[in-house]
Image (cartoon, grey):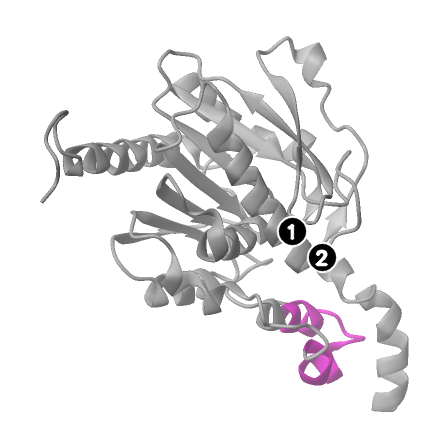
Amino acid sequence: MSNRRVFLLALPLLGGCTGLFFQPSRRAYTNLDALKIDFREARFTSADGMRLTGAFFPASTKPAKGTVVHFHGNAENMTSHFLFAYWLVKEGYNLFVFDYRGYGTSEGRPSVSGAVEDGIAALRYARSLPEVDPAKIIVFGQSLGGALAVDALALGGADGVRAIVLESTFSSFRSVARDKLSSLWLTWPLQWPLSFLFSDSLSPMKFVDRLPPVPILFVHGDTDAIVPYGHGKALFDKAHGSKEFWLVPGGGHTEAFTRFRQEYRPKLLEFLRKALAAEEKSQPPPGIEPR
């Protein structure tokens, strides 16, 4: 089969390019009301006026240790992905989850630039909530959500952020597209030329060294078949400041805090405790101005 024929057959698979990264659903995967847990729905707008949906889960203890803003992955919506982070509520953290445009009941259609703006808007909204200490924000991004979180933090959403957790995050839209294209027999011959259909202008590799100077944790499974761990290591190597890289032996995609939760949930809690404690120590006592 000629390269031209392969190219023409592959175009529908690319779904206008966005389909490789965004696989949204309008379906409600979990009925939060039926779970009888404490939460409230949030409505807020992105910079361009797009109306978005989120959910706020208050910490099980008061006052909250901090507030986790969760950037979810590329498929389904927040009604399934909140389960990756809800366990932190029982550990004393507020949790704010949200849907990018085109997901769940958020308006619009998905795009990388739009989702980054949505992330900035979500961080701004979370800081405004009455139960939230705006100086104790923790960002937890998984897979695509990690990439969007890096961009959102570097481009205006870093106020009050005290720790960043990036799990199974890719370093480049173009390179992870190439990984996916190489896994399909139909697109393997043209993985390089087809990958250039994807813009790298907002790839996290270009922004990871512009993250705020707070502790950053990179988590990646060494058998991740969706986003190979080399992506996470490349981001770690380029990031500045206080940083850690946890390679999860035998771990697949976003499995550290689910399949391997017995080991990695306590470690994450300790990482967050130290990050928040370090920030508190750096603040001057009341009534004393820093020099």
Q: Position of residue 243 (x, y in %)?
A: 29, 53
Q: Which kind of residue does numbered mark 2 sit on?
A: Ser
Q: Nearer the viewer, residue 87 or 65?
A: 65
Badge 2 local density, few (<14 within 10 Å), some, or many (20+)?
some
Q: Is residue 201 above or below residue 85?
A: below
Cβ–Cβ below 8 Å for labels 1 and 2?
A: yes
Q: In what element is the residue under mark 1?
A: helix
Q: In what element is the residue under mark 2?
A: loop
Q: Residue furthest top?
A: 36
Residue 85 in view in this figure: no
Q: The N terminus lies in which quarter of the figure?
A: bottom right
Residue that mark 2 sits on: 111
Q: The C terminus lies in which quarter of the figure?
A: top left
Residue that mark 1 sits on: 115
Q: Is 133 on the left-hand or right-hand side of 5? A: left
Magenta region includes residue 167:
no
| Stretch of the chain drawn in magenta | 177-195
Q: Is 29 on the left-hand or right-hand side of 60? A: right
Q: Nearer the viewer, residue 10 or 39?
A: 39
Magenta region includes residue 194:
yes
At x 62%, y 35%, the residue is 98
Q: Which kind of residue does numbered mark 1 sit on?
A: Ala
In space, the residues marked 1 and 2 are separated at their CA atoms by 6 Å
Q: Position of residue 204 (x, y in %)?
A: 50, 63
Badge 1 local density, few (<14 within 10 Å), some, or many (20+)?
many
Q: Is 234 on the left-hand or right-hand side of 95? A: left
Q: Position of residue 152 (x, y in %)?
A: 52, 52
